[in-house]
Amino acid sequence: MTILTPKGYRPARQPASERPEAPAEESTPAVGPAPSVEAAAPEELQPEAPSEMAGQQIKLAFPPQLVGINCPNCGTPYPVQVFSIVDVGQDPVLKSILLSGQLNMAVCPRCGTGGAISSPLLYHDPAHSFLGIYVPEQVGVNRQQEVIGQLSKRLMDGLPPEARRGYMLTPKQFLSYQSLLEAVLEHEGVTREMIDRQRRQLQLLEQALIALQDPEGLRILAADRDADMDDEFFGLLQALASSAASSGDQESVASLMQLRERLIELTTWGQGVQKQRAAVAQLKANTTPSQLLDMVVAAENDRVVDALITAGRPLADYGFFQELTQRAESAKAQGNEVEAQRLMDLRSHILAFTQQLDQLQQAILQESSQLLSEILAASDIRQAVSERAALIDQNFLSVLAANLDQAERQGATAAVRRMQEVWDAAVAAIQEDAPPEFTFINQLLNAEYPGETRKLLSERRDQVTDQLIETMGALIKQLEGEADQELAARLRQIRSQAQLMR
């Protein structure tokens, strides 16, 4: 059974052949906190509650406190966990949460309105001898020093005597949350210039999204700002799509991925991606290691080389490297030192890249295997899958399918039944969370071509929309980029059937 997880509609690993280097700024909240929801001052907070993150109980030196707030949009009261002290020396897990802009965020369970909570925050980084504090304007000037004193005392009391230092007696006060955050980022090697650059890229991305409905306007914008639409820009676009997918904002993800495909057609950066896709499209089911080597040697840059090696990794075996070495030695014997050196440099590059690929793949397999073990150990399979739905992707299904096949070969009927239950629950979770057109595409892929697919398309002609055709097109390019030519060809046939019904 073919099941495509909606890459671009939920967090998924982008093919390495098209994945830009992640800019350092990606961990930076680009424009500071969202409109704030007012919270109580420290002494008005309720008793401290243990923190629970990512479904696991984590013991923190300075746990959050429960605050009751009212939604500014619909007035619904609800509790939120608020951190008033972040000591990354004792609670390092909080650093990434802070830098990703997720610390002290409130989202209304009724209407979804969210924003940053305006509350005092003391930040301590002993590695840099840094102690900074932000106290919002809502706390009166006369009480600010009192708040600073209270939080400083809590920090000192929570530290062992030998960890207390003189700089802790005079925390640096910041007038805004953003300025505190920027000071923290500077210690992480993220400069103000880098933050400003990401802000500009976000503004450009917003402009591009607005222009998405105006093809000519988008073309003009892409031509005018071509130099700014680089690795970092597309990395930011992908990061925002993943973030939107995590929050279930399918409409935003669809727009972002549609924008990405359009900009690939319109930008210099996109021309590079098109070359990578064209190179990978040359790989067939019967391609030999020697033929892959011919393509790699003829590739015009390292990105095309990486795309070919990513898609054809099984072909880059011992014989592949042996032949590459022989070609280099042959060039040297013929007196072509430049070509010999180029081929040896290419060999070194591919060796390093394949090692990275193998390490990544091993990590992915380990993650998926661990996830499968956790689900199989659960008393309620469907509930276990539901709780981990955000982690179910194509990699997980591949690991599950391999284990299921092995169990069937070994005749382990009990294991087969249990893993089949996991499979059914995982597929149901994917289809439940996927956009309607993606569910329809999966059903078409599992129908017999051409008779059953034509019947399905005819019966559900109202679902054969421009969005469906565009999604199919994007999936075909993605499958070609991953060297799944057979499935890409099948989907292309179905897409042609669908186009005839428009």
Image: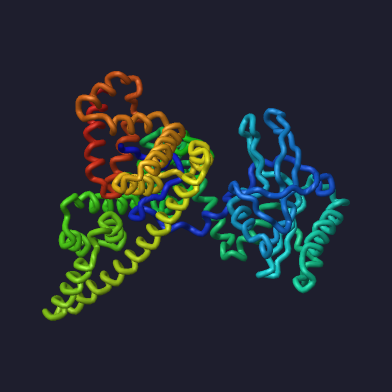
Q: Is residue 259 visible?
A: no
Kindly give the residue lying farthest to the right in the view shown: 142
In this picture, residue 327 sits left or right of residue 98: left
Vertical comparison of 498 with 162: above or below: above
Quadrant for the C terminus, please: top left
In this picture, residue 245 sits left or right of residue 405: right
In this picture, residue 299 sits left or right of residue 188: left
Task: Report the residue at 70% width, 61% height from top.
Answer: 87
Task: Report the residue at 78% width, 70% height from top.
Answer: 164
- Total marks drawn? 0
Q: Is residue 461 visible?
A: yes
**Quadrant in the rendering for residue 447:** top left
- Give coordinates of residue 286: x percent, y percent: 16, 52
Vertical comparison of 24 with 339: above or below: above
Quadrant for the N terminus, please: top left
Foreground of the two, 154 or 304: 154
- Give coordinates of residue 177: x percent, y percent: 69, 52
Task: Report the residue at 23% width, 24% height from top.
Answer: 454
**Quadrant in the rendering for residue 157:** bottom right
Kindly give the residue lying farthest to the left in the view shown: 334
- Give coordinates of residue 204: x percent, y percent: 48, 46
Foreground of the two, 383 or 164: 383
The colour style of the image is rainbow
- Give coordinates of residue 405: x percent, y percent: 31, 46
Foreground of the two, 493 or 252: 493
Task: Report the residue at 16% width, 59% height from top.
Answer: 291
